[in-house]
Amino acid sequence: MSSLHCKSLTELRGMLDEKQISAQELAQHFIQRIQTLDGALNSFVSVTAEQALLSAQQADRRIAAGEVNALTGIPLAHKDIFCTQGIKTSCGSRMLDNFIAPYDATVVERLQQAGTVMLGKLNMDEFAMGSTSESSFYGATKNPWDTQAVPGGSSGGSAAAIAAGLTPVATGTDTGGSIRQPAAYCGITGLKPTYGRVSRFGMIAYASSLDQGGPMARSAEDCALLLNVMAGFDPRDSTSSEQASEDYSAQLNVDLTGLKIGLPREYFGAGLDAGVAQVIEAAIAEFRKLGAEVCEVSLPNSELAIPAYYVIAPAEASSNLSRFDGVRFGHRCDAPKDLTDLYERSRAEGFGDEVKRRIMIGTYALSSGYYDAYYLKAQRVRRLIADDFQRVLSEVDVIMGPVTPSVAPNLGESLKDPVAMYLSDIYTVPVNLAGLPAISIPVGFAQGRPVGLQVIGKAFAESRLLNIAHRFQQATDWHRQIPPAFK
Amino acid sequence: MQWETVIGLEIHAQLATKSKIFSGSSTAFGAEPNTQANVVDLGMPGSLPVLNAEAVRLAVTFGLAINAVVNRRSIFARKNYFYPDLPKGYQISQMDLPIVARGEVHVEMDDGTHKTVGLTRAHLEEDAGKSLHEDFHNMTGIDLNRAGTPLLEIVSDPDMRSAKEAVAYAKTIHSLVRYLGMCDGNMQEGSFRVDANVSVRPKGQAEFGTRAEVKNVNSFRFLERAINFEVERQIDVLEGGGTVVQETRLYDPDRDETRSMRSKEEAHDYRYFPDPDLLPVVLGEAFIESVRAGLPELPQQKKQRFVEHYALSAYDANLLTAERELADYFENALKVAGCEPKLAANWVMGEVSAALNKAGLDIAHSPVTANMLGGLLARIADNTLSGKLAKEVFEAMWAGEGDADAIIEKKGLKQITDEGAIAAIVDAALAQFPEQVAEFRSGKDKVFGFLVGQVMKAAKGKANPAQLNAVLKQRLES
C-alpha cells in the first residue's frame, strides 16, 4: 500500500468514510510534510495549519453525522491568486504582501462549502506573470524532480506541492499555460477549463479575457472531482457561462475506440526538443493501442499566437493592475510628498521587474496612435487562431501535442532572457486565445525531467478531456511517479 | 468683427436606479462616507462588475423617447486614468458602440421659435467617488459612496449658437429625463450635470474655432452666465491677437468667471479598450418594444394635447407641462372640479405655484393636493365661492384646515346667490348713503365704485359679485 500522500482522492474518501483515518489526522499528515519538506521547494506562501485543523474538525463532525460529499475532509491548497477571507492573498507580490481580503473567491467558497480542508496558499509568479515561478516576491519555487529546475509557472507552487505530496490537490489559474505548463514540468495532471466554465470572481485578474481557474492533481480522476465543485455559473462573474456544468466523473471510463486525434504539424516542428518529441510520440502510440485514430492537422496561425498574446495580455494587465495605487489597499510607500510621488513610489516598490515590463508593454499597446496597430491587430489574430481551432475540431475530436517544447529549464535561465521564456508557451497560449479547454497529463521523462502531453478539446468538452486522460492513466503509471526525494 | 458662438453640451444624467450600475450597493444620496461601497465599488482585487439591467432599460427609454438610434449591440470600454477617487484606475464607460447613437432634440425657445439640436450619442458609464479636501489636515479624504453610480452621458452636436439656446436645450433634456422618470434632475446634488464646449468663430467661417470645455455649472442660470463669460473671454483673446487654447475650464459662480483647469497638453491618453469583464450588451426587439410600450406621454406631446384638448394658450400649456408632476396635478384637479380648463390652469399657475415658491416646496409636496384644489375649483364653478372667498379657502386648505367644503361650512363662507337676500343687502346699504345715491343719479358716475364697495362691505364679501352688481345698477337706475 502506498503512503498517505500518494493516495487518490477516491482512496482518501474511502479511508475517511471507513474511519481508518480522521480528517484531522489527514490534515496533520500534510501539514507535517509541508513543515519538513517545503523548505527545499518554497511552494507555499502561507501555511494555515490552525485553520486547517479547525476545518478538519468540522469535516470530521460531518463525516460522523454521515453528511458527506466527495470532498469532505480532503486537504487542498489554493494558488495565492484566489482571495481568501481573513488570510493573506499576496498574488506573489510585495504589492499585496499586506493584503487580507474581506471575501472569498467563488472557487474558494465553493470548495470550502464542499468540506475541503485548506492547508495554505501556494507560491506563484508575481500576478501570474511568468512561466517559472521565479518572479514571486517570496522567492522561486523549485521543482521536486530536480531542485535545480524550475517547476514552471505561474501555478508553480501548486504543481510542485502536488508532485512532492504536500497536498493531494490544488487550484491553479491559466492565462497562457499557467496550469498546463507547470503540471507538465512537475509530472502531474492539470486542466484548463473552457473560458467561462469556472468563476473568476475573487481571482485576482492578470488578463481578464484569458484567465481561467482550474484543478491540478496527480490524476484526471482527481481533477474531475475538484472540477465538479469549481465549475458552474456565478452571477458575480458576467463572463461565466450559464451553460450547466456536468458530473465530470461520470464519463471517465468511456471507451476510446474510434476517438479521432489530430496532431497539428505546427506543434511538432523545429522548436520541439527531440527527447520530448519521442516521449509524446510514445504517448500517441499508447492512444492508438486504446483504439484512437490519429491524423495530422494544421493550425496555420499558431506562430502568431505569442506576439498576439504579448499584446493582449499586457494590455489588459496594464489596466487591471491600475487599482494597485497605494490608495486603498496593498503597498504604500513611506511618507509620500504628493499624489504623483505616492503613485510612483508605491508602484515602483510594490511591483517586480516582470510585472513592470508587462504594464509598460500593455500601456504602450493601448496608447493613442498605437492601438490599431497593436491591440486591434492582435484581436484580429486572435480571431484567426480561434477559427483555426474551430475548423480542425470539426474534423477531429481532440488535438494532441506537447505542452512545452522542452523540459523544465534550470533556475535562473529564463530571468536572463524573458523572450525565450515567452516562446516556451508557444503550444499553450493559442488555446487561451481561443478560449478552449485543454488538459496536461504526465507521459514520461526526457533528460530526467517530466514531459506533459496536451489534449485540447472543443468548448465545454471538459468531460471528454478528463475521460481521455483517465483512460490513458488507467493504462499507464506516469501519473503515479513520485520524485525520489519526496517518497 | 462679428463673432459667432458655437456650443455643444455634455450632460451627465444620474439614472434613478436603486443600486449601482455594476454592483448591488445603494445609490441613495447623503449617507455616511463609504457606507455605500462594497468590494466592487472599492475596486478590490478579484472583484468583477455585473451590469444593472435597470440602467440599460432607462438608457433605452431615453433613446426611444427622442427617436434616436438605439444600438442593438453596445460595448463597455475602460477609460484609464489615475485619480484617488477612481478606485480601479479606470472608469467603465462606452466608447465605440454607445447604447444610444444619433438622434435629434427639438427645443422650443422662450420666444416660441423652434430649434433642432443634433444628438451625437448617449452612453452609459459609472460615476467616480469624491475627494474631500477639507477637514483632513493636508490630507485628502475619499468617499466612494458615489463610485459606480449609473450615469447617462448625453452628448449634443455643436449646434447651439447662444447661451440662451444652450440653456433652452439643457432645460428640454432636463424636463425630458424627469418625465421619463430616469433622473431626478437635481442639479445641486449633481444628479444632472452640464458641461459646455464653447468656441467662437468669425461670422460666416465654416470651420469651428478652438473650444474650451466649461465644467462645474450647477444651475441653468450659471450655465448661461458661464457660457457668456467664456464667449467674451475668447473674443477678447482673439481680438487681442491671441489664440484660444483647447482646455478644460472651471466656472466659479462666486466670481462669475471661468478658470483654466488643465490644458490639452496635460490631457490624459485614456487608452480606451473594450472591458473584458463585461459582455457586449445585446438588446432584442421584444425588449425594445416593451420599453417603447411603457413610454409616458412626453412634454411636447402633452403640450400639444393641452392646447388642442383644453383650449389653453401655448404659453399656459408650456408652463403646465414643464414638469410631469405639475401637468398631472393640473389634470387631476381639473378632473375633480369639472370646471373650465382655463380656471384650473390659472389656479395652478397662480395661487398654487406662488404658494409653493414661497414655501420652497415642489408640487409633489404641496399641502393642497390636486384633489383638494379640484374640490375648491368645483365650488368656484358652481358659484358657491367668489374669487375672493376662494382665496381665503385656499389659504385655509394650505394651513391644513381641511378640504374646501369643510372650510366653507366651518367659516360660513358660502357665497350669497339668493336674489332677494342680495336685494335686501343692497337696499339696506343704499339707505345709509342717500347723498351719494343722489349724486350718482345726477350723473356723477364716479361714485358708483364707492357704492359697490359699501354694498360689498355690507355683504361681508359673501355676495356673488355679478349678481350684486346687477342688483345695485338696477336699484340706482330705477
Image (cartoon, coloured by chain):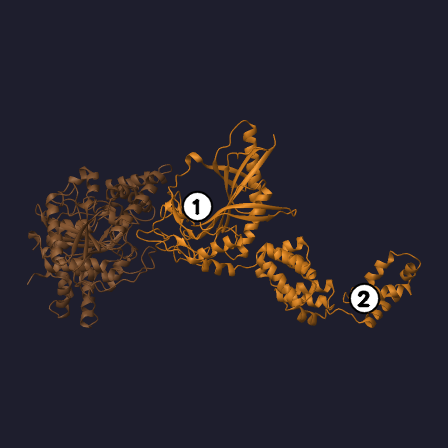
- Provide residue B30's location: percent of width, then percent of height: 46, 55
Numbered circle sitting on residue B467: 2
> Which element is circle 1 on?
loop
Location of residue A289 by image quarter: bottom left
> Which element is circle 2 on?
helix
| Chain with colour orange in the figure | B
Q: Is residue A459 above or below residue B258?
A: below
Within-10-Å neighbours for mark 1: few <14, some 14–19, many 20+: few
| Left or right of A16 on screen, residue A386 | right
- Nearest the camera: B349 or B386? B349
Residue A332 visible at all: no
- In the rendered structure, which amino acid carries the disc numbered 1? Glu
Q: Earlier in the sequence, mark 2 or mark 1?
A: 1
- Provide residue A183's location: percent of width, then percent of height: 16, 51
Quadrant for the C terminus of chain A in the image? bottom left
Distance from disc 2 to disc 1, alpha carbons, whole Å, reads 68 Å
Location of residue B426 by image quarter: bottom right
